[in-house]
Amino acid sequence: MIDWSWFPTNAERLVPALGAHLLLALLPVVIGLIVAIPLGWVANRSRPARAVLVPVAGLLYTIPSLVLFILLPGILGTQILDPVNVVVALSVYTVALLVRSVADALAAVPGMVVAAATAMGYRPARRFAQVELPLSLPVLIAGLRVATVTNISLVSVGALIGIGGLGYFITDGFGRGNTTSIFAGVILIVVLALVFDALLVLIGRLVTPWVGVGRKAR
Amino acid sequence: MIEFRGVTKRFPDGTVAVDALDLAVEDGKITVFVGPSGCGKTTSLRMINRMVELTGGTILIDGSDIMAGDAAQLRRGIGYVIQQSGLFPHRSILDNVATVPLLLGWGKRKARERATELMELVGLSPEMAQRYPAQLSGGQQQRVGVARALAADPPILLMDEPFSAVDPVVRENLQDELLRLQSELGKTIVFVTHDIDEAVKLGDKVAVFRTGGLLAQYDEPGHLLARPADDFVDGFVGRDRGYRGLGFLSANGLPVGELSTVGSGATGDQVREAARDGWTLVVSDAGHPLGWVQVGQALSGPVDTDALIAGGSLYDTEADSLRGALDAALSSPSGLGVAVDASGAVVGSVRAADVLAALATARRDEAAA
Ligand SMILES: Nc1ncnc2c1ncn2[C@@H]1O[C@H](COP(=O)(O)OP(=O)(O)OP(=O)(O)O)[C@@H](O)[C@H]1O
Ligand SMILES: [Mg+2]
C-alpha cells in the first residue's frame, strides 16, 4: 500500500534528488546536441563520413547503459561513483541518437532552397545557421524528444551504482521492501519524462511557426 | 554586358553540357536562352553567377572576369529567380524579399522598408508580408521570387524557367508583368525557358541552343520566326511560325477602310440602308463595338442588342502588329476586322488581303535593306 505520509517526510530528500535527476538527464542532451550537429553536418556532406558515423552511432546505442557506467571510470580515470560517468555515458547515447537525426534532417532540406540561398550570396557557414539548420528543426526536435525521454529514464539506472537521481528511491525501496518509495521514484520519473516531452513539443511549435501553415489561408 | 568567350562546361562524369559558347548578352535587354531539354540552358545560366564553375573559356561582366573575385560577393550583385521560386519556407514573405539587403548588411529596418517597396512593385498586397511562402499561390510565390531577386537592385537578373510551374493564365499574367517591370527597370535579364512562345514573347534577343550546348541561332525573335538558320531551328520554332512572325511586323501603313455602323437604337430600315455586303456593326453611344447584324435577319422592330452576332478580336490601330490585324479580320463574322483606337472606339475596318499585302511590302523592304 502507498503510505502518503511518506511524501512530506521525505520531501527534503525528494526535491534535491529531482534536481540531480534532471541535471544528469538534461546536461547530456545539451552536450550531445552540441556534438551531434557538426557530426551530423559532416555525415550529410560526405558519403564516406556518413558510412562510418551512422553505423558507429547505431553500435554505441546498443551498449547497455550499466556496462557503460561501469566501463567509463576505467576509460576516463574517474571514480566509479563520480556523476561525470553518467553524464558522459548519456552524452554518448544522445550523440549516437542525434547524429542520425541531424544528418537526416539536413538531407531533408529541399535542395532547391539551399541552391537558392547560395545563389542569393550566402556563404556556407551562414547558410547553415540561417537556412539549413532552421529548416531541419522539426526532425531535430523529434530526435531531441526521444533523447530527452530516454535520458530521463536511463539516469535511474545510475542508482544501481549509487549515483543520485530519483532512481535511488527505487533501488532503496526494493532494498527495504518500501512500496511507497518505489512508487514515488517511478511516478516522478514518468511525470518528468512526460513534462519534458510536452515542453519540447511546445518549444518545437514556437520555433517552427511555419510548419503546418500551408493548407490554411490559401 | 555579359560576354561568354569560348565557354565550356564538362561535368566530372564527362558530359559536355556547354561547348565553346560565344555569346554577348546586351545591357538593359531581355535575352532568352531556349532549346530542348538537356541542351545546356541552365548550365549556361548558372555559370554566370558561378553556381556552376566553367571548365573552359571566360565569362566577362562589364569586361571583368567573373572568376577574379569572390563568388558570394558576385552573387549578391546578380538577382536569381528559379522555377518553384525556391523561397525560404521558414521566413515570412517580407523577410524572404529582404534576404539580399540583409546579406549586404543594410540593417533590418532599411532592408524591410526596401522589401515592402518591392512587394508593391511586383503587385503583392501588403497583408501578405507576414505570411509564409506555403500560404501563397504558385503565381504569388513566383512574384515573391522576382521581388527577392530585385531587392538589392542588381543590374543583372537571371531567371531559370521562372513561370513554368504555374497555369497558363497565370503564366501570361506574370509574363506581362515582367515586361512591364522591365520597361520601368531596364535590367539586363537572362531568361531560360524551353517554351519557344515564351521566348519569342519576352526576348529582345533569343539564343536557340541545340543539344550539347551549341548555339544554333542568336537573333531577334522576329528574325528567328522569319528566317530560321537551319532545319533544327525551323523545327524548334514550330508550326505557325509564319503567322506568329506577323506579331513582329508593325501595322503602320496598313490601310484602315470604311465600316458601316449603326447605333444601338437603330430601326430595321436604318440597318438595311447602312449595311454593306449584308453586314453592319452595332456600336454603343461611346462608339464601342457591340456586335454584328446581318441584313437577312428578320428585322421588324429596332435592333435587339441581345440578339447580335458576336464580333471577333479587335485590332488596336495604335498598339497591334500585323498579327492582331489579321486575327481581327479572320475572326470577324463579316470578314471585316474591326479597327479601334486606344479608347476602344471603332475607327474602321481591316481586310485580310490588305494585311497580306502589307506583309509582302515588309518582306520587300527587308530584302532591300
Ligand atoms: N551535375 C551534373 N553532372 C553531370 N551532368 C550534368 C549535371 N548537370 C547537368 N548535367 C547534364 O548537362 C546537360 C545540360 O543540362 P542543363 O541542366 O543545363 O540542361 P537544360 O537545358 O537546362 O535542360 P532542361 O530544359 O531540362 O532544364 C544535360 O545533359 C545534363 O544531364
Ligand atoms: Mg534547365
Image (spheres, coloured by chain):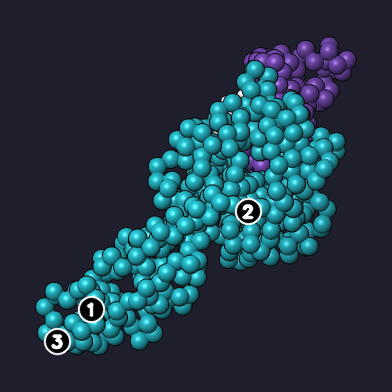
Chain colours: A purple, B cyan
| Closest to the observer, B153 or A24 | B153
Residue type for callout 1:
Ala
Q: Separation of disc 2 and disc 1 at Cα?
A: 52 Å
Say if residue B53 shows up in the picture. Answer: no
Q: Which percent across, then down, holds residue A118? A: 72, 39
Q: Which mark is residue B37?
A: none
> Are discs 2 and 1 both within one chain?
yes
Q: Which percent across, then down, holds residue A162? A: 76, 22
Where on the picture, by quarter, is residue B144? bottom right
Residue at the disc numbered 3 = B301
The subunit letter for the residue under badge 3 reads B
Q: Which mark is residue B146?
A: 2
Do tag 2 and tag 1 residues touch (Cβ < 8 Å)? no
Q: Which mark is residue B275?
A: 1
Q: Which percent across, then down, holds residue A90? A: 73, 25
Q: Earlier in the sequence, mark 2 or mark 1?
A: 2
Q: Which percent across, then down, holds residue B34? A: 55, 40
Q: Separation of disc 2 and disc 3 at Cα?
A: 57 Å
Q: Separation of disc 1 and disc 3 at Cα?
A: 16 Å
Give neighbour class at mark 2: few <14, some 14-19, many 20+ (Cα, 10 Å): many
Give neighbour class at mark 3: few <14, some 14-19, many 20+ (Cα, 10 Å): few
Which residue is at a point 38% across and 63% down the rendered structure image? B354
